[in-house]
Image: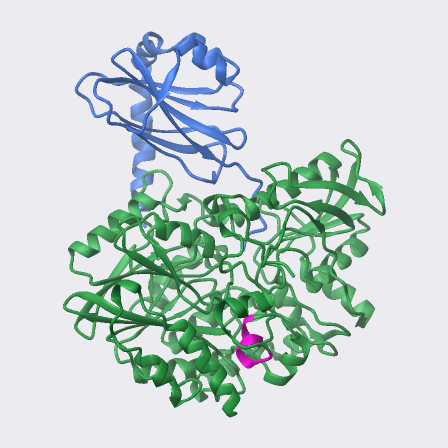
Chain colours: A green, B blue
Amino acid sequence: MKRREFVQMLGLGVAAGMSLPLLSGCSRKSNAAAAGGLYELPRFGNVHFMHMTDAHAQLMPIYYREPSINIGVHGARNQPPHLVGEALLKSSGLPANSRIAHALTYLDFNAAAAQYGRVGGFAHLATLVKQVRASRPGSLLLDGGDLWQGSATSLWTKGQDMVDASKALGIDIMTGHWEFTLGADRVMEIIENDLNGHIEFLAQNVKDFDFGDAIFASHTIREMNGVPVAIIGQAFPYTPIANPGHFTPGWTFGIQERELQETIDKVRKQGAQVVVLLSHNGADVDIKLASRLSGLDAIMGGHTHDAIPQAIQVKNSGGGLTLVTNAGSNGKFLGVLDFDVQGGKIKQWHYHLLPVFADLLPADPEMSALIDRVRAPYLDKLNTTLATTEGLLYRRGNFNGSFDQLIVDALMESKDAEIAFSPGFRWGTSLLPGDRITLEDLMSQVAITYPQTTLNEFTGERIKFILEDVADNLFNPDPYYQQGGDMVRVGGLDYTINPTAGSGNRISDMTLNGKPVEASKTYKVAGWAPVAEGVEGEPIWDVVGNWLSSKKTVPLLEPKQPRIVGLQDNLGLV
Amino acid sequence: MKRSRRSFLKLAGTAVALSMVPLKLLADFVRPKEAMAATDFDGVFASLGNAQDSDKIMLETPDIAENGAVVPVAVTSSIAGTSKIYIVVEKNPNPLAAAFMIPEGSEAFVQTRVKVAQTCPIYAVVEAGGKLYKTGRETKVTLGGCGG
């Protein structure tokens, strides 16, 4: 490692190692300790959590471009995680043009990706986990869910590849979201057989719809270096709404604040000295939730794929502080939260968000062998080249990414549609200019268990209703009414959006080929990923795969963006 | 998972249904016919009377409905002398969705499912000592999809 890189990482450590005002007075050992090297974090305190989330089944190292548009409105305006690019770096005191800047932002992405290489990969992550674990005896590895979905092999093995890899990685506790799209029976089969005795699957907010009986264990209490700690699980509250409800018949989700507080009070009574919520709520929901509970020390969250370099300190309803952390996605980061607990009380804490650079962390041989074994039967299929891309392909951001543009272009052309919709998923890896697009790369954008493509005739009025509905899920002033996906990706249609306007009034000036969209006229609209049961249609990977094969080369794509109005000095937007 | 309990109760449900006929007769005494027939929010309160906001009613509804056809609603009133609890869904074609009589001495807690046609506030209205009190929360009904 170069000296400059080390200093940059040290900067992150300092930024992240802020102490609670109430708990100050202790020396900030971890800052000085980071001097050992990029990934050498000497032990701090006696309670340690490693946190990963939203790996989306990316066993291999990948590129993942962080968003250039991540708008926060109302209370979330210009607050983490709604800061992008330079604003994000500035708020955390991090240097531009650095390795850490590349990990956290989209800035100069192509050149920086070429310079610093791929990120994540379970073999490299395993090496980091082993290092952290060696320095922190007794530490727990928490996974926030979206672990079993997002790749070709996870879809084809019904999550088995990820289950095996996560056991080998040593995940101790997890919760879920996309896991449930494998279907309730498969989820229970994995939990009862594979995870039994290895990984505890916790979700306090999933219940039987008829009787309110818990489907999963809500929490676990572990003793760590003599300190009893409680971990409570919170699955994605809107799973049966954002994804097809028919995968989990008879289960109800939701945020369940009252029951959650009861669980916190219960584990406190049972002696837990540190209480952590392992959450798949999304950053904005977690920040609100933290303010409405008491007795919770930290929420380690995911879902919105935000890589937040520091722990956010939220004043909770009991007058204390609750930390909220989010550890990015795709195996790109590992969060490390250390508490120093003395006499039953937290004296100080440190949080570090470590980027996983594949070039800097040697592959763990055991994990490499496991991954090779998992992939072997599928290698030919995975490596099938469909086309070559001349430009950067990525997805993440509030509106269309270039990979979404490719998908909606393919849909419109293949289905002879005027307009196409593609879901605002936040997963989906990136490809650099000149890269081959393999079937594996395509599957990393579309590997879901409800892949049917559709062609509908919608009136202009219906199209506006759909855009308004999704926009409200993203920009509702109250995070509890947000679902956490990005805006639906749109092909063909131009529109104006005012994120700060009220529900039903954000979308205007819809035009198609320069002509206003008429409320009563019908339009042919292609789409995929229907939430209704029993929809028939060619799988999206066939439609886009055939389209790519026919093109051979994909030129540089400018993702179509709506005109965004009503925002002034918003740091979530470049 | 406690699936067995559900299958057991399915059988038990048949027996309960058979015993419910007399309850229908009772319902006619309680049923606020005019308010039930009202086709807008103001019409409901014109019939029931005006209700003042109260923080002594705990209303539990989902922030976003998983299925607008069966939205769980729970109401707990800590207002002394609670004798009736109504559930009003503001934008439904008939906003008054349910009326419960709370006999003296019973815990003022009810739980049911209501249809919610579109995103709107749901109100719990409590009658106590001849006065009406209310509290409301918005439940969003969305198309779904696009999440994650």
Which image quadrant is residue A268 in?
Answer: bottom left
The answer to whether A49 is drawn above or below residue A363 in the figure is above
Q: Which residue is drawn at 63% across and 53% down?
A: A423
**In the figure, is residue A114 to the left or right of A238?**
right
State whether residue A314 is above or below residue A392.
above
Frontmost residue, A241 versus A20:
A20
Residue A309 picture location, percent across and down = 46, 69
In the shown orientation, is residue A368 left or right of residue B110?
A: right
Q: Quadrant of the C terminus of chain A?
A: bottom right
Question: Is most of the magenta stretch helix, strand or loop?
Answer: helix
Residue drawn where x is 33% and y is 70% of the image: A172
When the figure is inspected, residue A197 is found, relative to residue A409, above or below; the finding is below
Q: Does the magenta stretch include residue A263?
A: no
Look at 33% across and 27% down and name the residue there.
Answer: B14
Residue sitting at the far right = A514
Residue A426 percent across, percent down from the top left: 57, 60
The residue nearer to you, when weighing A78 against A324, is A78
Where is residue A549 shown, x and y percent of the image?
78, 69
Left/right placement of residue A399 relative to residue A212 reads right
Residue located farthest toward the bottom when viewing the structure as drawn: A2
Q: Which residue is drawn at 58% across and 64% down?
A: A84
- Residue A7 is situated, as x and y percent measured from the top left of the image, at 47, 85
Q: How many labels does the image show?
A: 0
Q: In this view, does A182 lie to the left or right of B31?
A: right
Q: Is residue A489 above or below residue B101?
A: below
Residue A509 visible (yes or no) = yes
Q: Give the range drawn in magenta.
A: A97-104
Q: Is residue A213 visible?
A: no
